[in-house]
């Protein structure tokens, strides 16, 4: 067993783990962060995308021991829920846009898509449709045609910038 300590969604966690334990399994099994999905275990789908030290990573390709000392942000850490029970009021703009723009169907890929999109928008706050599509490469959705996902990312980008943008995709 190996000791690990990391800051996950603003809270410090210390545990003893098997050296071969993947970060995705540490997050889900040790910390209960089940919003981080296990999709393929081969890094092809991106359903397990989280942020490690500010950058998106596929947590099925990172060992928990490699994240030792790191700062991890998961989908659960994005929202700040209000005490009045209005969950939507605390949603991150990306979560809200995926909801309002119907950027999901089954929702399995959505946490990874949102985390990858957040990384994209931190580098490019005003992406074009092509830049969004390129930025989300490596995150697969088996249900949608990506049109509403792209629209959701561009809508969130506009909200985060504080302005309006034409979110028509494919026009």
Image: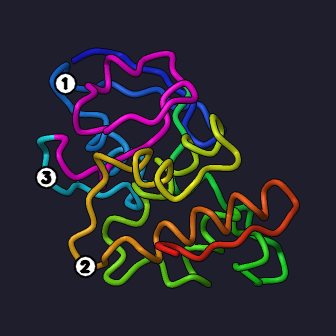
Q: Residues within 10 Å of mark 2 (few under 14, many from 20)?
A: few
Provide the residue span drawn in magenta: 43-70
Check disc 3 and report its element: helix, strand or loop.
loop
Estimate the x, y position of residue 4 in percent, counting from the top left. Answer: 40, 19
The vertical placement of 3 against 89, above or below, is: above
Q: Residue at x 22, y 52 (%)?
A: 45
Q: Which mark is residue 40?
A: 3
Q: Which mark is residue 60?
A: none
Estimate the x, y position of residue 31 in percent, counting from the top left. Answer: 42, 47
Q: Nearer the viewer, mark 2 or mark 1?
A: 2
The vertical placement of 156 against 133, above or below, is: below
Estimate the x, y position of residue 71 in percent, counting from the top left. Answer: 56, 27
Q: Residues within 10 Å of mark 3 (few under 14, many from 20)?
A: few
Check disc 2 and report its element: helix, strand or loop.
loop
- Colour scheme of the picture: rainbow
Q: Which tag, 2 or 1, sits closer to the chain's start?
A: 1
Estimate the x, y position of residue 13 in percent, counting from the top left. Answer: 51, 32
Residues under labels 3 and 1: Cα distance? 21 Å
Q: Which residue is mark 2?
A: 143
Q: Which residue is mark 1?
A: 18
Check disc 1 and report its element: helix, strand or loop.
loop
Residues under labels 2 and 1: Cα distance? 35 Å
Q: Residue at x 33, y 65 (%)?
A: 109
Residues under labels 3 and 2: Cα distance? 16 Å
């Amino acid at each position: 067993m190996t000791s690990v300590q990391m800051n996950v969604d603003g809270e410090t966690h210390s545990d003893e783990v098997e050296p071969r334990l993947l970060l995705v399994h540490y997050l889900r099994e040790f910390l209960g962060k089940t919003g981080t999905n296990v999709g393929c275990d081969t890094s092809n789908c991106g359903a397990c995308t989280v942020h490690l030290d500010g950058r998106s990573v596929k947590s099925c390709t990172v060992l928990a021991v490699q994240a030792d000392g790191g700062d991890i942000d998961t989908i659960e850490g994005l929202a700040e829920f209000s005490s009045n029970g209005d969950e939507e009021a605390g949603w991150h703009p990306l979560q809200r846009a995926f909801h309002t723009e119907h950027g999901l169907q089954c929702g399995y890929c959505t946490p990874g898509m949102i985390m990858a999109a957040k990384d994209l928008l931190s580098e490019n706050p005003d992406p074009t449709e092509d830049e969004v599509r390129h930025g989300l490469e490596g995150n697969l959705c088996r249900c949608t045609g990506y049109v509403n996902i792209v629209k959701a990312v561009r809508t969130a980008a506009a909200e985060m910038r504080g302005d309006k943008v034409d979110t028509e995709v494919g026009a």
